Image: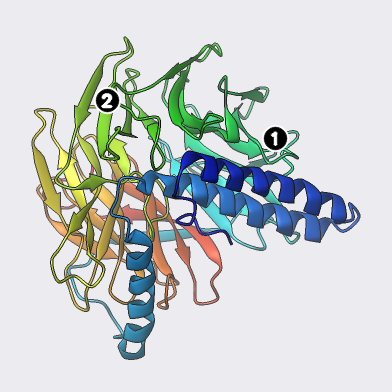
């Protein structure tokens, strides 16, 4: 698999790398017999994952240049620590009930991605031939599966609104990404941002009004944000001060609120990262946590920047720490509307070092997410609105390197959705119905 950290020298080098991926895709595709569907779809899945990780990990552009070494060192340390792994993990446990699920035709994993305010879940699953298909799981546990025409190299739902309308990205025969909108009782719509190249158009979120936000790279490998109205009108934008040269420059949008405010991050001309809010009128407000903001990061399972309806924002930043074997830790920040910050770690038990990643915030301010501990095992956490942090694990989750529990979202009522990786390294979905906590897990 292509390392996302290798393509970090200059724009032309990254462009050549992507171009080579596309050429290789087309060449390999022609060399594989169309009759051998399994080989074809395995190739598609591998290339999709490689480029998707490259896109996601490009958000690390503002972090210290030794982050590749830090991630490798953490992996090595986790492997060594596993020789002394405990039968349980320290810390207060979140009380609640688990429901696990798999898409009916899933053979090689179920990968949920988002949950809406009413408890509907979207994501994708892989069948016996490694072909990926989208799914919608309703509140009663019923599944509807779907495919996007021309999705040769896979489909990845990335957002779902309260009405169950889903957005995401699919990849065509040339491995170019296109946005889509899918509704259970409506036609499929596809779209592209003007000037999108390389990975293509990548939606990330959809609000109750049907407005979609996301990002795309142009031919110079500069990132830009976009907002697509329900009627199909697409507006592109760049945060003021966003750079156009250097390591992964540009603007990246990841969330959109019910009133149309877009949240994301950008890299300036000096390579420093900043958060931003963009109003429907095009006005920008920038913000900076105590360290380098990271929308995506190594050892996390999804985006790491979220906003609730009242404007409370949670995200991940990298804090350099003297003497830390990895150079520092990923920590969680909470930004209030007055631009003040609170920071926390999901856990602090040994061995060093625990990296924490939020994945959702309720209207009441409760935050859920995942932590990757010193054994490199993943666990879920819930921070109540009073600041109390508890952790949880799906009973069937594996306890080896990069296995475990990874929340991916939370409803206003406090129901947590995510994925877990079992001891056989198969991925499944879960819902965690949290018992009421003092301090408020939900509304």
Q: Position of residue 381 (x, y in %)?
A: 26, 59
Looking at the image, is mark 1 or mark 2 earlier in the sequence? 1
Q: CA distance from mark 1 to mark 2?
A: 31 Å
Q: Is residue 3 left or right of residue 21?
A: left
Residue at the bottom extreme of this rendering: 83
Residue 39 lies, in percent from the top left, at: 79, 60
Q: How crowded is the residue under tag 2: few (<14 C-alpha within 10 Å), some, or many (20+)?
A: many
Image point (50%, 77%), residue name: 423
Does any portion of residue 441 appear in the rendered image? no
- Identify the secondary structure beneath mark 2: strand
The vertical placement of 158 against 429, above or below, is above
Q: Element at badge 1?
A: loop
Residue depicted at x 18% and y 55%: 319
Q: Residues within 10 Å of mark 1 (few under 14, many from 20)?
A: many
| The C terminus lies in quadrant | top left
Q: Is residue 239 above or below residue 231?
A: below
Q: Where is residue 347? Give x, y as percent.
A: 19, 65
In depth, the one of 348 and 249 nearer the eye is: 249
Q: Is residue 218 left or right of residue 67?
A: right
Q: How many marks?
A: 2
Return the x and y of residue 224 as percentages of the image width and height. 44, 27
Q: Residue at 66% of width from left, 25% of height from top? A: 188
Q: Report the mark closest to the observer, 1 or 2.
A: 2
Whether residue 164 is visible, yes or no, is yes
Q: Which mark is residue 277?
A: 2
The front one of 411 and 75 is 75
Relative to residue 388, is residue 358 drawn left or right?
Answer: right
Q: Which residue is mark 1?
A: 148
Decide if residue 233 is on the left or right side of residue 185. left
């Amino acid at each position: 698999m292509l390392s996302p950290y290798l393509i970090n020298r200059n724009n032309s080098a990254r462009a050549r790398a992507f171009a080579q991926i596309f050429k290789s895709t087309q060449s390999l595709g022609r060399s594989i017999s169309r009759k051998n569907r399994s080989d074809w779809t395995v190739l598609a899945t591998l290339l999709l994952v490689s480029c998707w990780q490259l896109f996601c990990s490009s958000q690390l552009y503002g972090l210290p240049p030794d982050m590749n070494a830090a991630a490798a060192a953490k992996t090595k340390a986790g492997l060594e620590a596993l020789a002394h792994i405990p039968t349980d993990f320290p810390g207060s446990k979140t009380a609640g009930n688990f429901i696990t699920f798999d898409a009916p035709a899933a053979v090689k994993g179920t990968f949920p991605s988002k949950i809406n305010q009413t408890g509907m879940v979207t994501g994708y699953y892989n069948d016996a031939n490694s072909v990926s298909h989208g799914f919608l799981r309703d509140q009663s546990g019923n599944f509807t599966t779907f495919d996007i025409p021309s999705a040769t190299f896979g489909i990845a739902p990335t957002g779902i609104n309260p009405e169950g309308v889903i957005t995401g990205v699919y990849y065509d025969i040339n491995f170019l990404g296109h946005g889509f909108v899918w509704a259970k009782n409506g036609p499929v719509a596809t779209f592209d941002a003007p000037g999108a190249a390389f990975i293509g158009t990548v939606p990330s979120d959809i609000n109750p009004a049907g407005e979609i936000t996301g990002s795309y790279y142009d031919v110079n490998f500069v990132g830009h944000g976009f907002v697509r109205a329900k009627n199909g009108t697409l507006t592109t934008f760049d945060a003021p001060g966003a750079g156009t040269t250097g390591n992964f420059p540009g603007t990246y949008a990841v969330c959109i609120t019910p009133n149309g405010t877009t949240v994301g991050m950008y890299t300036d001309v000096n390579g420093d990262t900043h958060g931003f809010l963009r109003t429907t009128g095009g006005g920008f407000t920038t913000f900076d946590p105590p360290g380098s903001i990271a929308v995506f990061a190594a050892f996390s399972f999804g985006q790491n920047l979220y906003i609730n309806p009242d404007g409370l924002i949670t995200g991940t930043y990298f804090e350099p720490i003297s003497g830390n074997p990895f150079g520092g830790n990923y920590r969680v920040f909470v930004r209030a509307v007055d631009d003040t910050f609170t920071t926390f770690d999901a856990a602090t038990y040994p061995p060093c070092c625990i990296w924490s990643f939020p994945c959702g915030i309720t209207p009441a301010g409760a935050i859920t997410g995942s932590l990757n501990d010193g054994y490199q095992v993943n666990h879920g956490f819930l921070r109540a609105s009073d600041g109390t942090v508890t952790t949880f694990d799906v009973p069937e989750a594996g306890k080896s390197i990069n296995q475990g529990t990874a929340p991916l979202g939370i409803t206003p009522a406090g129901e947590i959705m995510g994925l877990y990786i079992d001891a056989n390294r198969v991925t499944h979905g879960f819902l965690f119905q949290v018992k009421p906590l003092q301090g408020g897990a939900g509304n």
